[in-house]
Amino acid sequence: MSAELQDTLSFLLRTIGGLYIMVVLIRFILQMVRADFYNPLSQFVVKATNPLLIPLRRIIPGVGGIDIASLVLAMVLQIALVYGLFAIKGMAIPITLALVQSLYELINTVLNLYLWSLIVIAIASWVAPGSYHPALMLLNQITEPLSRRVRRVIPPIGGLDLSLMAIVLIIISLQKLLPAIFRVFLG
């Protein structure tokens, strides 16, 4: 297989697979924060994930209000994506490496979801304060539990909420530390 074809297939697999895994993780997060499932975007997430998630829920029940089936589905899809990307290159990897790489990718995806959600919320608060757009409402519902906890430590100063900036700095710091943490597991 030519290098160009490998690159194209890798790009397509990474993009399509990564987007679907992101949707599965969003579903997990929406359930964790008890977001509005009547929001049109929530409905899209539910309909996109139901074909794979409903059969899995028959085998893997939720525990303590946590949708374990969503996490298992995200992990299985991520492992398949890692194996697929290596297979395109004609390489095989051990299951332990695939597990560690998949866990790293899932954590990084969740951190990116929160990072970009916070950035969008911050920009929207300047451009369209008080907007009731379904996407902004959903992003607020996703990030508010975390923001509320940080606001307890860093209250608004002069009407300026610094909690979003603090969370963004924490997420970026975690993303910079994540490779080093996972290197310890690999070896």
Image (tube, rainbow, N blue to C red):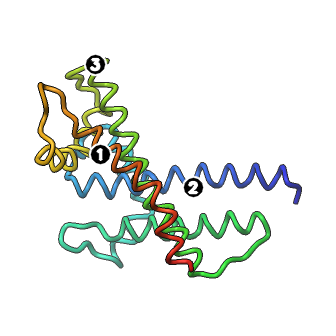
Residue placed at 39% from the left, 58% from the top?
Answer: 50
- Element class at badge 2: helix
The Cα–Cα distance between marks 2 and 3, rounded to whole angstroms, is: 33 Å
- Element class at badge 3: loop
- Element class at badge 1: helix
Report the amino acid beneath label 1.
Ile
- Disc assigned to residue 167: 1
Left or right position of 180 against 122? right
Question: Dot 2 surroundings within 10 Å: few (below 14), some, or many (20 or more)?
Answer: some
For discs 1 and 3, the disc positioned in front in the rendered view: 1
Left or right position of 34 against 86? left
Q: Which residue is mark 2?
A: 17
What is the x, y in percent for residue 76? 50, 71
The Cα–Cα distance between marks 1 and 2, rounded to whole angstroms, is: 28 Å
What is the x, y in percent for residue 56? 39, 72
Q: Quadrant of residue 29?
A: bottom left
Whichever of callouts 1 and 3 sits on the residue coming sooner in the sequence is 3
Question: Dot 1 surroundings within 10 Å: few (below 14), some, or many (20 or more)?
Answer: some
Residue placed at 29% from the left, 38% from the top?
Answer: 165
Report the amino acid beneath label 3.
Ala
Q: Which residue is mark 3?
A: 128
Whichever of callouts 2 and 3 sits on the residue coming sooner in the sequence is 2
What is the x, y in percent for residue 90? 79, 69
